[in-house]
Amino acid sequence: MIMREEKTEETPNGSYRVATSGDIEVSTYLEIAKEITGEQQAVRREAVSGAERESIIVLDFGSQYSMLIARRIRECHVYCELLPHDTPWEKIAPLNPKGFILSGGPASVYAPGAPLPPAYVYESHLPVMGICYGMQALTTQLGGRVAPGDKHEYGHVILHLSDLDSPLLVDLPPSTPVWMSHGDKIEEMPPGFTPLAHTENSPYAIMGNRKGFYGLQFHPEVAHTPEGKTILKNFVYRVCGCKGNWTVGNFVSESIARIKEQVGDGKVINALSGGVDSAVVATLIHRAIGDQLTCIFVNNGLLRREEVERTFNTFRLNMGMNIVYIDAVDRFLERLKGVTDPEMKRKIIGGEFIEVFEEEARKIGRVDFLAQGTLYPDVIESISSVSNASAKIKTHHNVGGLPATMTLTLLEPLRYLFKDEVRQVGLELGLPEEMVWRQPFPGPGLAIRVIGEVNKEKLEMLRSADWIVMNEIKKAKLYRQLWQSFAILTDIKSVGVMGDYRTYGYLAAIRAVTSEDAMTADWARLPYDVLARISTRIVNEVPGINRVVYDITSKPPGTIEWE
Ligand code: XMP
């Protein structure tokens, strides 16, 4: 039972009750839960028909799926940002929000200190959708009751619609599977709400009122809820009135205009790696300011076969960009001599990269901006107020993660994009498909795929094996379905026989995984005949390797890279 001491507060939008229970402040927005007034409708209409820009704001309560909500909304061509649940209104207003989504989260609304949405969520008179914990928070604030569930619902359950006329449920079948993951449940809906759908254990699996406030007990954002995207689409178009102007074409033209304005006649440098993010950043900026951009491309000797030529040809020869190519192969290998510890390798490569980059940047003369391929997931991670301080598994070095000591203004045109959006932008800009769909490649390169000490011979062996893996995977038309597929050169040697001869050679491992975001990954069930071809070719074509194994470890408990 929540104990409440109540007081009434007056605001320009009416009065609402603020109740305190221990150290939690629970606001019950009673006025707001009532029918929408004419004045409020006017506010809503003005907000909807306002500026060109429109957005949906997801307030994050710490669910592992929060970022997915934002991705799904963007897939509906509506701009969406994921922000900490306590973000002040001043940061949100310029985004011209058309509606709010309250994410799920690990807390219980009745626990002391439980995070709750700020008052503006209700006072702005915009539609609100609470998902799982978000629904419970909304219920509590609007005067309903949440309690610990006697049965936890987890996994697939069947949702039965009870209101087929709700705008949220247009185009949904009467019954459909949904993904549940909750312990607490709604015991009593807030005043003015009606149940729109139920499951076996949740009488209020979806609830809503006539003001455009909805609560969903399940997760519409996950792939396990097949009709989830229809619900989200209905929310943003039918409930929030979005127009759907978030398209790749719009992004490219707006972004070029913004870069031109920001840079003026300044000079920009960028580290090119051959990866899709740095390629898209370079192309976008080049479109905007041409020769004011100089790309520095460092060959650290740890790249894949043909990577150097391909990158140079694409950007220098085909696109006519200013590229400074630095052959730093010997320098990196010298520094890596005798080093076997994975973290040490990463530190050395990251440090050396910064040194080389700074040396070259100095030679260019006056530079004002440093372009980086920062993506939205990195931004979210750095601003999230509810992210758990997870234990550091590996130090990731990205060629984009550049010098803290350089006094340059950062230019990060992909800062608000997800990876799949970056790929679409790359295609829109005319980058070769092969480059746009390239699988991720780690900043420390092949050094963390040669187990133990790295040297030229081992790198060459690995490059040959890796080339075979890539070609066979592409031939089998599996390349795009896999998050990553590559070879590892272990430091184990074993005995084999070739013809009439005994061999004593290295063991190569093959790693192929499927993943959405590299946070988790599953080992790919590659067809046996593809594995067989890869194995036969490596042993026959790469001198020094006489045995091949396939890594069948998922992440967790394994990581994708071996070091
Ligand atoms: P792990 O091995 O941690 O890798 O499961 C997750 C994803 O990150 C890539 N990776 C890196 N990327 N710099 C990068 O830019 C790095 O130091 C680095 N280490 C791992 C890895 O390839 C996988 O996609």
Image (cartoon, helix red, strand yellow):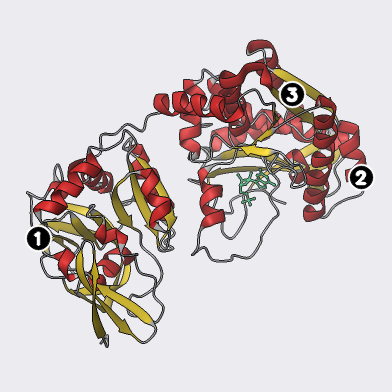
Name the residue rendered at 57%, 28% in the picture.
280
Mark 3 secondary-structure assignment: helix
The quadrant of the picture occupied by the N terminus is bottom left
Q: Name the residue under label 3.
A: 308
Which mark is on residue 337?
2
Residue 375 in percent (x, y) is at 55, 41
Q: Is residue 349 left or right of residue 148?
A: right
As drawn, 174 above or below 266: below
Q: Which of 90 and 402 is in front in this view?
A: 90
Q: Which of 64 and 287 is in front in this view?
A: 287
As drawn, 350 above or below 1: above
Q: Which of 362 and 153 is in front in this view?
A: 362
What type is the residue that disc 1 sits on?
Glu
**How many angstroms separate mark 2 from mark 1 (CA)?**
73 Å
Query: In the figure, residue 403 lies in which quadrant?
Result: top right
Q: Do the residues labelled 2 and 3 touch (CB within 8 Å)?
A: no
As drawn, 68 above or below 372: below
Mark 2 secondary-structure assignment: loop
**How many angstroms separate mark 2 from mark 3 (CA)?**
23 Å
Q: How many numbered tags mark residues here?
A: 3
The disc, 2 or 1, on the residue closer to the chain's N-terminal end is 1
Depth check, mark 3 against mark 1: the one in front is: 1
Q: Mark 1 points at which residue?
A: 35
